[in-house]
Image: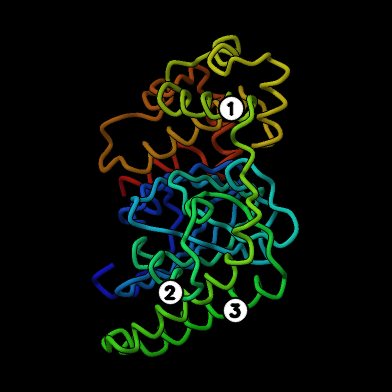
Amino acid sequence: MSNSSIRKIETDNIDALGAFHVNKNREYTQFTRGKMQAHVTEISLNQAQIMRESLNVGTRIEAAPADCFLPFAVVLPQSSPYQFCGAAANGTPFIQASGGVWEIKSKLELDYVATVFLREHFLKSFHTLTGIEPNANILTSRLTQTSSTLQRHYAHQVLDIMRQIIAQPKLLQDSNIQRLICSQLIKLTVDIINPMLSTPEPINQFNKRQQGINRVVEYIREHCQQLPDITQLCQIAQLSERSLQYGFKERFGITPVHYLRVIRLNGAHKQLLTLEKSTMSVAQIALNWGFVEFGRFSRDYKALFDQLPSQTLATAIS
């Protein structure tokens, strides 16, 4: 975060969106029908980063940020229902994405604001502000309940700071102003998480079913082109078919077989988007991802991405 900057992207290219997030190891998967439109504004300061991201279709974001970063976020009210690391967001939640790998999945639209801090700077500031030694709860990815007042205040203040910097970019050239902004952002975040640290609310990823689902999700990520069947997935999850089906519907709203198809469709979509010249046909790409019925592939592709695969390919090579 040593280079101060304002960066923006507006795109319908899911790969370009992932690439925009430098050093965040993000992967996006589209789950509901429509042409994705993503808008991101990112402001980097010396010791922190502020971001707003919005997506118009149901999407899963998976991330494995570097250990030196601690991200926090609030999903804005206009968003659809969502889950964070498998836990449904109820009440007035605050997102701690500070435990390494995390995942958020929205039913439809998702619009959120986030603050990201350098780990050591944030933990030292937390101790200075509270007099309390930071504990493991700060470094746990989870949804925690806060008051609606604190949640609204956090979102309002972060958006207000972003507006001020965008209106006056020269503010980033003043190291003292940067220091004050970073201090304000840390205070906002500490105020919202400090009351919750004594009552941990770990996300529901450690019970048997969630562990099994995590294994299947990871396996599908690495081996989806091998077309595993439901029996294999049950063996990997060490769960019955009924339990696996229930867990996937609870977490993703679809069955494991449907989930596998969505992942394969996203894989084909990303490959079509990244072709720079017509070196492969749509049929070849479909076969690469295990689709042997080309007519059904085209129908399913259009149902998810709102365009035919041939249209995506034509746009990529034009």
Dot 2 or dot 1, earlier in sequence: 2
What element does badge 1 sit on? helix
Q: Which mark is residue 128?
A: 2
Q: Is residue 155 above or below residue 173?
A: above
Front residue of 207 and 279: 207
Q: Quadrant of residue 60?
A: top right
Q: Is residue 215 above or below residue 267?
A: above
Rounded to the nearest angstrom, the CA distance separating label 3 from label 1 is 36 Å
Precedes in sequence: disc 3 or disc 1: 3
257 to the left or right of 175: right
**Above or below 198: residue 195:** below
Is label 2 in a helix, a strand or a loop? helix
- Is label 3 in a helix, a strand or a loop? helix
Q: Amino acid at mark 2?
A: Thr
In which quarter of the view is residue 208 placed?
Answer: top right
The furthest residue to the right:
91
Residue that numbered label 3 is attached to: 156
* Residue 40, image x, y percentages: 45, 65
The CA span between labels 3 and 2 is: 25 Å
Mark 3 surroundings: few (<14), some (14-19) or many (≥20) residues within 10 A: some
Identify residue for label 1.
213
Instruction: Give x and y (percent) for residue 229.
Output: 56, 12
Residue at image position (53%, 75%) is: 188
**Sequence-wise first label, 3 or 2:** 2
Q: Residue at x 59, y 31 (%)?
A: 299
- Residue 206, compared with residue 131, is above or below; it is above
Type of amino acid under label 3: His
